[in-house]
């Protein structure tokens, strides 16, 4: 039971990290576009 809980927690943390990276990338894009740079990917 403890092992599965730890596994779930690890997956949750991984998802949280990925989500934060996406948000960071989006805000970075917004900042660049505000400065007048064409940001394409």
Image: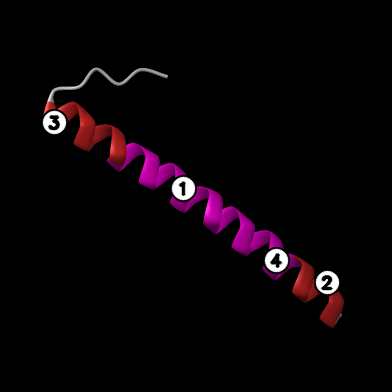
Gap between marks 4 and 2, in whole Å?
A: 10 Å
Q: Which of pointers 2 and 3 indicates the residue nearer the eye? A: 3
Q: Looking at the picture, tell me which residue is in the foreground, 40 or 7.
A: 40
Residue at 38% across, 46% down: 23
Secondary structure category for the residue under label 4: helix
Of the 4 image quadrants, the one containing the N terminus is bottom right
- In the rendered view, does 23 fall on the left or right side of 3? left
Indicate yes or no whether the magenta region holds residue 41.
no
The reply to whether discs 2 and 3 touch (Cβ–Cβ < 8 Å) is: no
**Neighbourhood count class around disc 4 (C-alpha, 10 Å): few under 14, some 14–19, many 20 upward:** few
- In the rendered structure, which segment of residues is drawn in magenta? 8-27
Above or below, 17 relative to 36:
below
Q: Name the residue under label 3.
A: 34
Q: Mark 4 points at which residue?
A: 10
Residue at 70% across, 66% down: 10
Indicate yes or no whether the magenta region holds residue 15.
yes
* Residue at the left extreme of this rendering: 35
Q: Which of pointers 2 and 1 indicates the residue nearer the eye? A: 1
Gap between marks 2 and 3, in whole Å?
A: 45 Å
Secondary structure category for the residue under label 2: helix
Sooner in the amino-acid sequence: mark 4 or mark 2: 2
Predominant SS along the magenta part: helix
Query: Which x, y percent locates residue 3?
Result: 85, 76
**Neighbourhood count class around disc 2 (C-alpha, 10 Å): few under 14, some 14–19, many 20 upward:** few
Gap between marks 1 and 3, in whole Å?
A: 20 Å
- In the rendered view, does 41 fall on the left or right side of 16? left
Sooner in the amino-acid sequence: mark 4 or mark 3: 4
Gap between marks 1 and 4, in whole Å?
A: 17 Å
Residue at 83% across, 82% down: 2
Q: Name the residue under label 2.
A: 4
Q: Which of pointers 4 and 2 indicates the residue nearer the eye? A: 4
Residue 21 is labelled as 1
């Amino acid at each position: 039971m403890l092992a599965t809980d730890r596994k779930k927690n690890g997956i949750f943390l991984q998802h949280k990290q990925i989500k934060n990276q996406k948000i960071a990338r989006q805000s970075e894009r917004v900042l660049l576009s505000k400065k007048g740079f064409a940001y394409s990917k």
